[in-house]
Image: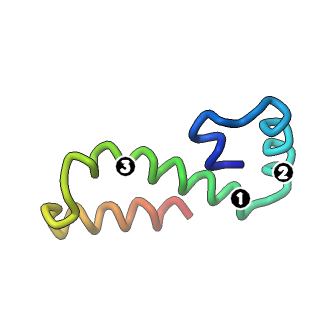
Amino acid sequence: MISKKEEGKISFIERIQLWQHLLICSLCKLFMKQNKLIASLIPEAEKKSVASLSDKEKQQIVDAISNAN
């Protein structure tokens, strides 16, 4: 449902169910945080291919994902 929510394809009832679940599930909260981070990085990544990223840029992406934990 988290991915569905990010795509804007979640019903009102599902939104409530997800909210209730997130109150108790730390793993899903972490997944949602990481999912949002990855989604925020996609527009920048689409501008460049991975091959054109510098080692520093690649490390920054890895660090950003690691720090989301």
Considering only order in the chain, which callout, 2 or 3, is on the residue closer to the N terminus? 2
Indicate the secondary structure of the residue bearing disc 3. Answer: helix
Residue at x-position 62% and y-position 59%: 31
The total of numbered circles placed on residues is 3
Viewer-nearest residue: 24 or 17? 17
Residue at x-position 65% and y-position 44%: 4
- Above or below — where is 48 with respect to 10? below
* Residue indicated by mark 1: 28
User: Callout 2: 10 Å neighbours few (<14), some, many (20+)?
Assistant: few
- Contact? badges 2 and 1 (CB < 8 Å): yes
Considering only order in the chain, which callout, 1 or 3, is on the residue closer to the N terminus? 1
Indicate the secondary structure of the residue bearing disc 2. Answer: helix
- Above or below — where is 32 with respect to 66? above
Viewer-nearest residue: 44 or 14? 14
Residue at x-position 17% and y-position 62%: 53
* Residue indicated by mark 3: 41
Q: CA distance from mark 3 to mark 2?
A: 26 Å
The colour scheme used to paint the residues is: rainbow
Q: CA distance from mark 3 to mark 1?
A: 20 Å
Indicate the secondary structure of the residue bearing disc 1. Answer: helix
Amino acid residing under circle 2: His
- Above or below — where is 61 with respect to 15? below
Viewer-nearest residue: 64 or 7? 7
Residue at x-position 18% and y-position 70%: 55
Considering only order in the chain, which callout, 1 or 2, is on the residue closer to the N terminus? 2
Q: Which mark is residue 21?
A: 2
User: Callout 1: 10 Å neighbours few (<14), some, many (20+)?
Assistant: some
Q: Which mark is residue 44?
A: none
Q: Quadrant of the C terminus?
A: bottom right
Does residue 35 appear left or right of residue 43 in this picture? Answer: right
Amino acid residing under circle 3: Leu
